[in-house]
Image (tube, grey):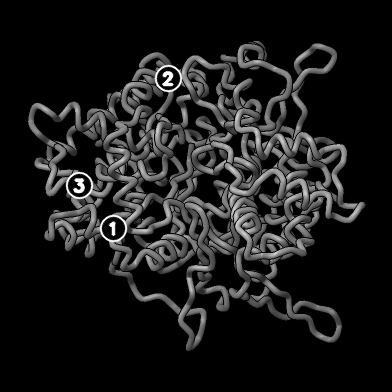
Amino acid sequence: MSIVTKTIVCAALTLGTTTSVMANEKFNYVTDRFADIEVLRYKVPGFEELSLNQKKLIYYLTEAAISGRDILWDQNNKYNLALRTLLEDIYTNYKGDKGSEDFKAFEKYLKQVWFGNGVHHHYSMDKFTPGFSQEFFDAQVRALPAEKHPAEMEEVLRRLIFDPAFMAKRVNQAEGADLILTSANNLYDGVSQAEVEGYYNAIKDTTDLTPVSYGLNTRVTKVDGKIVEQPYRVGGLYSRAIERIVKNLGEASKYAENDKQRAVINKLIEYYTTGDLKAFDDYSILWVDDTDSQVDFINGFIESYGDPLGMTGAWESIVNFKNLAASHRTEVISDSAQWFESHSPVDPRFRKDKVKGVTAKVITAAILAGDAYPATPIGINLPNANWIRAAHGSKSVTIENITQAYDEAAHGNGFNEEFVPDAAMRELMDKYLFVTDNLHTDLHECLGHASGRLLPGVDPDALKAHGSTLEEARADLFALYYLADPKLIELGLLDNEDAYKAQYYKYILNGLMTQLMRIEPGKDVEEAHMRNRKLISEWALEKGAADRVIEYEVKDGKTYIKINDYPRLRELFGELLGEIQRIKSEGDYEAGRDLVENYAVKVDPKLHKEVLDRYAHLDIAPYKGFVNPVYKPVYDANGEIVDITVDYTEDYVPQMLRYSRDYSPLTK
């Protein structure tokens, strides 16, 4: 509910000056390309200027981050870890012709599995299709050394790879289906959707104004016919990985920048040790209150997009430090949070009377892990608990070294020329899209997710499977509405009253057309962020049809988007924001479901084919992700760390194999 993903962006963008971390050497952003994926590197500017203790803190936090990798793989599917081990064993023991079609297809499949943290695509949730033959696979399994031969798992893994109907979709969101029984993730075992919903409805206290995040860190299963929760904690599920996380958090605590930060780390250790969700709430409150530290991190079971019911958090971690210079704009926004809330185009009943503790900053990511790796968000707003946000506030971040890497890698890709026919709009996008992209993320995270309130007694999970889509739409609409407000010029964040049009055009173009390149022919839109963008764009297209606010136009056989009335489009964004806020505040499941099903799901096959054909000529990867830098301690003669260096040369395949070798406590 609080992650912003990177959409396909337009080509050359004007970037500010940044500090080079590769002296006298051009930084090579792209490290690999396969299937629909491009893997990039990212810089960590400013790391060298940190103090030694800050570097040590980051080092141990990064070790804690990478140590949780296996958890996400197992959450995604119960056979993922066994599959990864087998595929890597085949890859590293292969003695045949590496130029053969079967081997090249096998290597591509392995790279896809690595990128998806399992056998399903990270975005579409569909299972990967192997391009190699079953005969090739069987021969490679037989060729493995005896100690690496997975006799007891061989048949189920063969079926997982080659049977399209077996565990076909990691997260199913199809209306009318049992979303648990038809989803292939490992968050539930032997239980139905009705049983799970009945279980939580029975234990939730609807009078509790400070409820824990039910189901956040558990697998739900049956023992002796009774539904139980198995907690993720030391001594419970994933114990070996969590013990390693806790050990590195303990080392990081020694180098905390202040007592507040040390308290945050120690409370997180308590939560991991006990699995107590009340301890997680206490940790979240302490984390929100720590606004003085330059180094920061998230680590835990956070976002629930991987759960069809939107409850269980996927394991993830991002370690970062504040970009002091770039944070000025987010601080300006957060300082004006009450103004934005008070002027929001929603019913005053659903606004916050007093906005508390909204802090925002621009950060430099130091490491990405779990559900934030290799594909990563560009912005985060946490915590997710509504009552904590209302009573204690939230933290919002924009990850600018990641957005810069995306934009640097996109230079000259031909997107603008193909999809934006108007030269004046291309010029406006070249000049303002980078800044409005970042402002959109700032407003989405800092204010959008932090805005509004639930009415007393409304269940935070009332919108069920559609909650994530509607929450992302609410935050996007808040950002879109205010991007066009003169307040941004007054605050000095924009210098042109038309700058917002660059973002409006890109957003509508993406929501109606270009994001379709991420979907296979015949498929519906299923991922929450894509549904959100389609919902907003399709709704605005329909509601503005009488005034021709937005329209399709065809030139030389190609379809384009034309926006005729930008001020009216802004009004439409405000109207939809008001309705979605009402739905969330009142817990109106039926109205929320109707919005999603009517505007966010179905795809026009003719337009879809056209978009796919036009993208094919551009050769742009629909999805991008990252390899991490490598942090290396430098020791003196007494074995004391005297520095931490950063190395950017590790490529995708070596990094994945090293992580499996050195950071796989659940497979040992």
Give the camera-side residue of 135 and 497: 135
Q: CA distance from mark 1 to mark 3?
A: 24 Å
The reply to whether residue 297 is visible in this rendering is no
Q: Which disc is residue 660 wearing?
A: none
C-beta proximity under 8 Å, tags 2 and 3: no
**Residue at image point 80% right, 84% down:** 636
Q: Which is nearer the N-term, disc 1 or disc 3?
A: 1
Give the crowd class for mark 1: few <14, some 14-19, many >=20 residues within 10 Å.
Answer: many
Residue at the bottom extreme? Answer: 24
Indicate which label's residue lies in the foreground, 2 or 3. Answer: 3
Q: Position of residue 338 (x, y in %)?
A: 33, 41
Q: Position of residue 427 (x, y in %)?
A: 17, 63
The reply to whether residue 554 is visible in this rendering is yes
Look at mark 2 in the image and give the residue it sits on: 455
Secondary structure beneath dot 2 equals loop
Look at mark 1 in the image and give the residue it sits on: 415
Indicate which label's residue lies in the foreground, 1 or 3. Answer: 1
Say if 166 sits above or below 238 in the image: above
Say if 640 sits above or below 610 in the image: below
Q: Position of residue 436 (x, y in %)?
A: 28, 55
Look at mark 3 in the image and give the residue it sits on: 484
Q: Position of residue 148 (x, y in %)?
A: 87, 52
Indicate which label's residue lies in the foreground, 1 or 2. Answer: 1
**Identity of the amino acid at label 3?**
Ala
Q: Is residue 368 left or right of residue 604?
A: right
Q: Is residue 297 left or right of residue 602?
A: right
Q: Which is nearer the N-term, disc 1 or disc 2?
A: 1
